[in-house]
Image: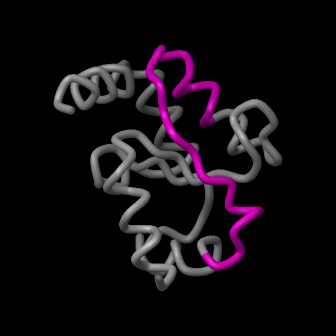
Amino acid sequence: MNVIKIIQKQIQENPILIYMKGSPDSPSCGFSSRAVEAISSCGIKFAYVNILEHEDIRSELPKYSNWPTFPQLWVHGELIGGCDIILQMLNNGELEKLLQKKKCKK
């Protein structure tokens, strides 16, 4: 399976998915750490892909998503954004509303 098909499958199969450096328990960069903290604070389960273990995904996802940096948060197939957007949404209450609403759709 080519890497784009793998990415599409991951996004399709995981309602809330973050592509990050490291894992939620052990983030490998500050941006991934802050993004995971923000998502976790909403009390919603989410999936993750450690891009440091998947060089092919790390190189192809920015082209697929048209988003050059990591982490990347995807909710029901839609790219939400990276760390700055996630934190902004958390601070204004939008993140929890979005994740709760999307959680109920599945």
User: x%, y% of residue 90?
Assistant: 46, 24
Question: What color scheme is it?
Answer: one colour
The answer to whether 93 is drawn above or below residue 76 in the figure is above
Q: Quadrant of the C terminus?
A: top left
Classify residue 90 as left or right of residue 9.
right
Residue visible at 64% across and 79% down?
A: 56
Q: Range of the magenta residues?
A: 35-56
Picture layout, residue 90 above or below residue 31? above
In this view, the residue farthest toward the front is: 1
Identified at 40% across, 49% down, the residue is 74
How far across and down, in percent of the image, does residue 49 sit? 60, 53
With 93 as the anchor, is 21 left or right in this view? right
The answer to if 91 sits in the magenta stretch is no
Left or right: residue 103 versus residue 55 is left
Q: Position of residue 30 (x, y in %)?
A: 78, 42
Based on the picture, tell me whether residue 51 belongs to the magenta stretch.
Answer: yes
Q: Nearer the viewer, residue 82 or 40?
A: 40
Residue located 48% across and 68% down the image: 67
Query: How far from the left and from the top, in percent, is residue 83?
Result: 58, 44
